[in-house]
Image (cartoon, rainbow, N blue to C red):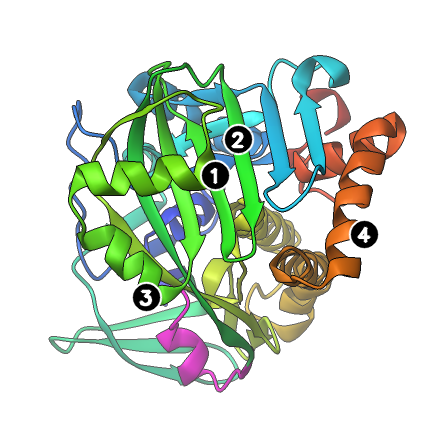
Amino acid sequence: MDYDVLIVGGGMVGATLACALGGSPLRVAVLERGEPDHAWPRTEYDIRVSALTRASTRIFEAVGAWEGMEARRVSPYRAMHVWDATGSGTIHFDANELGEANLGHIVENSVILGALRERMAQLDNVELISPAEVVSLERESDAARLLLAGGRRLEAALVVGADGLHSRVREAAGITTTGWAYDQHALTASVRTSKPHEEACWQRFAPDGPLAFLPLPEPNLSSIVWTTSPEHARVLSEIEPSAFLDELQQAFGDRLGRMEAVGQRGVCPLALQHADAYCAERVVLVGNAAHAIHPLAGQGLNLGILDAAALAEVLIDAARSHGDIGARPVLRRYERWRKGDNVAVTAAMDGFKRLFGSQLAPVRWARNFGLRLTDATGPVKQTLIRRAMGLSGDLPRIARSVASR
């Protein structure tokens, strides 16, 4: 065989899996269609950022990529302020209440991927093949084979689909999905405000969708994620900056003072999708190839990073016991581990989306009452935030604190 593991998709989840397999007995190749620009330093901020949980940062630390992210730029957030725009419901989370240094980090996607690619290049058992476009997948009882554009053929014990929402690996393996498109798009941009963000995330829920301000390293600069109708998102992306800032001020209010400047704007459609199976013969799925969720709580990438860490642990354990890493029983261990948690989070995010989108008076009353009650109930609130931070649950070894590994 050419390799033990072929990872199709060199994005953040695929690259994390490759790094987690670094130093193992497995020969790994990562196939990526294009080669993004990871040149550093950059003056402009990426319009796409991720809210990394503590579990994700521990994984990045363990695989040797976090140092590269910190050397570029990361922004810790130490508090979260959430409120309902249609009532008095509000909830506040603070790292000090948990005895933690922070609740997580806001990191540009280009920073995450650049540091992971940098780490991949240092690993003797990992090879990046780029550009590489998969044309077909063939599977037999003992191996999987990929045909690439240009005629090159690669054989491995296992093919990993880390190729996103429209996964060609998933399609070729005959794995079906369940889901639907939301009648919402997310607009992202960097916005400068007259008041500092205080290293806090600020999120307002309105009937048309949530609007979040996520802190960037500069004290008065935030990355926004504005979820709204497709038509409104299109208008917001095309109007003049001054008009956009006026709309943003009206939607968010003055908690961060005046909206002073906005950078490049981008829009993407939102959808829920979940693979009906995470594995098939000689194939396994991770990240958005397996599940895509509403971004209102910023959990999507974190679930994918946990997928990568869990799959790496399962594969390394199998290899060290001289097992077949592409065998269905091995892959089913990963599926049983991750699928239940991912389904639960997906359902919860869909439920929150529908709960905060309802204008029925009883529902509005219930959600505002629920926010106030949860905020006043310390143990419940701490349980919720610790779970969201990745400090509890059935975590992979490298996602746990050093003391509990």
Q: Position of residue 228 (x, y in %)?
A: 43, 57
Q: Position of residue 254 (x, y in %)?
A: 45, 25
Between 74 and 149, the one nearer to me in the picture? 74
Asked if residue 21 lies left or right of residue 73, the reply is: right
**What's the residue at 52%, 28% (across, down)?**
201
Between 359 and 209, the one nearer to me in the picture? 359
Quick one: SS at disc 3? helix
Q: Position of residue 299 (x, y in %)?
A: 56, 47
The residue indicated by pointer 4 is 366
**What's the residue at 60%, 72% (across, down)?**
327
Label 4, residues with CA under 10 Å away: few <14, some 14-19, many ≥20 = few
Asked if residue 139 lies left or right of residue 265, the reply is: right
From which residue to which does the magenta span run? 163-177
* Residue type, mark 3 in image: Glu
Quick one: SS at disc 1? strand
Mark closer to the observer (4, 2): 4
Q: Determine the CA span between mark 1 and mark 3.
A: 19 Å
* Residue type, mark 2 in image: Trp
75 lies above or below 405: above
The residue indicated by pointer 3 is 231
- Is the residue under label 2 in contact with that under label 1 (CB below 8 Å)? yes
**What's the residue at 72%, 60% (across, down)?**
344
**What's the residue at 41%, 68% (across, down)?**
165
Q: In the image, is residue 165 part of the stretch drawn in magenta?
A: yes
Quick one: SS at disc 4? helix
The residue indicated by pointer 2 is 202
The residue indicated by pointer 1 is 212
